[in-house]
Image: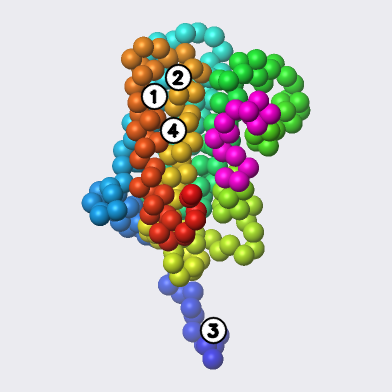
Amino acid sequence: MNDCRKTNRDANVPEGTDFFRGVLRFTSRCETLTDEYLASESPQGRISTHEHLGTLLSLLDRASSCWWGCRRGDHAGEMLVGRCCSYGLCVFKLARSGFYDESVSLARTVGEITNLAVLFVTDPSALQDWQSVEERTRRAKYSPGAVRRALEARSFPVPVDQSRYQQLSGKAVHLPPTIPPQMYNAERHPKTGGCFQETGLCFALAEIGYPFSVLGPCAVELCGLSGENGAKVCRAADALSKSLRALRTRVNASFPGTYS
Ligand SMILES: [Zn+2]
């Protein structure tokens, strides 16, 4: 029997800022493994989602910061798109460092905003209403569930529907007691954040790539882009969408049926 009273097990465990330094050294190793994995060729098809996501985020960052010119007004569309850009960068940063659950949690938030963006583009009166109603009404009327139902009621496509939302919520947000943290391995082992896991990386990239592939065309409308700038955003979103198949194939290889 291990007698903790006779050996000071904690003597060499870093605390204070040393703990953060130790964790950052650990995650730095994960970032290197992630970069090597994403740069590698594979018989199952090369992963390119991160490349296309980077291009789309760059374009949306420019659109949301009036880089191509300011059209004045309240900038409601630009702020919505700009917020998603920040989330998108964080999703990639977290996934690259091996914090997959946290990455997926933020990707779910981007999905919620994307649903809202689709509602605004397909029903411009909803955007005006969202801007003008008082806070309590806005929270109720434009909650993630209410937005999904509003899209369904109009027979509009719902980018992040109930089934997808529940999958993401169950995996990374609402914490059911039976799902271990960072469990993206065939052995079904829980892990700490910062450990490279191929399936975790592919799942996180697929889950951030998908909402951005839908948000891109919406951003063209919401930010009033026209001509070549709008076309560039649409081309980047289309390339991002097409890149998702390779990721989904890899996720299904470890967790069959995750994607149909
Ligand atoms: Zn402006």
Label 2 sits on a secondary structure element that is: helix
Pointer 1: residues within 10 angstroms few (<14), some, or many (20+)? Answer: many
Query: Which residue is at a point 63% across and 28% down the rendered structure image?
Result: 155
User: What's the distance in space between the residues labelled 4 and 2, CA to CA?
Assistant: 12 Å
- Number of labels in the image equals 4
Q: Which residue is mark 3?
A: 4
* Dots 1, 2 in contact, CB < 8 A: yes
User: Would residue 148 be found to the left or right of residue 34 on screen?
Assistant: right
Query: Which residue is at a point 65% across and 25% down the rendered structure image?
Result: 154
Residue 95 visible in the snapshot: no
Pointer 3: residues within 10 angstroms few (<14), some, or many (20+)? Answer: few
Label 3 sits on a secondary structure element that is: loop
Determine whether the beta carbon of the residue marked 4 sits less than 8 angstroms from the nearest atom of ligand 1: no
* Dots 3, 4 in contact, CB < 8 A: no
Q: Is residue 24 above or below residue 6?
A: above
Residue 99 percent location from the top left of the image: 46, 53
Q: Which residue is mark 2?
A: 220
Check disc 2 and give the amino acid type: Val
User: What's the distance in space between the residues labelled 1 and 2, CA to CA?
Assistant: 8 Å
Residue 103 percent location from the top left of the image: 48, 47
Q: Which residues are magenta?
A: 151-164
Q: Which residue is mark 4?
A: 213
Q: Which residue is mark 1?
A: 234
